[in-house]
Image: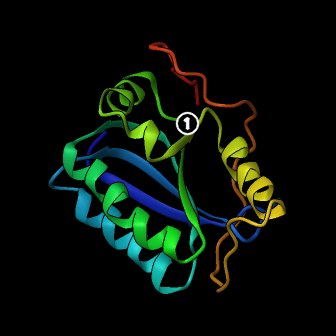
């Protein structure tokens, strides 16, 4: 797969969440597009964000840096950024870098979306703002750390 494709959606199950779906690979040549997409959400006041990485087969340090550089600002605004559906190779790097101590990851998009409802019910993350996002996927199951965390799409 060449380059990167980034799209937005808003799940019917929790419209306070914005889903950023990424396809392709994230490296120094493509990370600017991902960063701009994330910043567009933040400018709209959308701070509850799930990044769906099901279609990503590689993330370089430049890509990981985007998530880490924005997390403080997102959390200061009452939101969070969560990762979903990483393939095994991508998850291994995530784990190797020990980013699980900073960012939550989930095996499925649906589980990541549901985690915001739980947080909101507990007085946690909430968001204001609007955008024209559509519905997303509905896989189930929490992220289980394993080297073979491959998901068929």
Q: Nearer the viewer, residue 70 or 13?
A: 70
Q: Position of residue 116 (x, y in %)?
A: 72, 57
Q: Position of residue 24 (x, y in %)?
A: 35, 44
Q: Quadrant of residue 2?
A: top left
46 vs 68, left or right, is: right
The residue positioned 20% from the left and 51% from the top of the image is 62
The residue positioned 41% from the left and 66% from the top of the image is 72
Instruction: Classify mark 1: helix, strand or loop.
Output: loop
Compared to residue 105, the image places residue 142 above or below, namely above
Neighbour class for label 1 at 10 Å: few (<14), some, many (≥20)? many
Compared to residue 99, the image places residue 73 above or below, namely below
Q: Which residue is mark 1?
A: 85
Q: Quadrant of residue 119?
A: bottom right
Compared to residue 113, the image places residue 14 above or below, namely below
111 vs 57, left or right, is: right
Compared to residue 92, the image places residue 60 above or below, namely below
The residue positioned 65% from the left and 37% from the top of the image is 108
Name the residue at the left extreme.
Answer: 28
Number of on-image labels: 1
The residue positioned 75% from the left and 34% from the top of the image is 140
Q: Nearer the viewer, residue 3 or 125?
A: 125
Q: Nearer the viewer, residue 24 or 131?
A: 131
Image quadrant holding the C terminus, namely top right
Q: Position of residue 63 (x, y in %)?
A: 27, 51
Q: Nearer the viewer, residue 33 or 15?
A: 15
Image quadrant holding the N terminus, namely top left
The colour scheme of the drawn protein is: rainbow
Q: Quadrant of residue 130?
A: bottom right
């Amino acid at each position: 797969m060449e380059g990167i494709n980034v799209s937005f959606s808003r799940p019917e199950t929790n419209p306070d969440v914005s889903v950023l779906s990424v396809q392709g690979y994230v490296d120094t040549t493509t990370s600017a597009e991902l960063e701009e997409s994330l910043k567009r959400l933040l400018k709209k006041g959308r701070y509850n964000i799930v990044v769906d990485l099901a279609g990503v087969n590689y993330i370089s340090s430049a890509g990981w840096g985007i998530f880490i550089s924005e997390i403080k600002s997102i959390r200061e605004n009452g939101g969070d950024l969560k990762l979903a559906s990483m393939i095994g190779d991508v998850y291994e790097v995530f784990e190797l870098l020990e980013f699980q101590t900073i960012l939550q990851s989930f095996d499925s998009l649906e589980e990541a979306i549901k985690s915001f409802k739980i947080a909101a019910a507990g007085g946690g993350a909430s968001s204001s703002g609007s955008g024209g996002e559509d519905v997303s996927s509905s896989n189930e199951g929490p992220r289980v750390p394993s080297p073979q965390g491959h998901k068929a799409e």
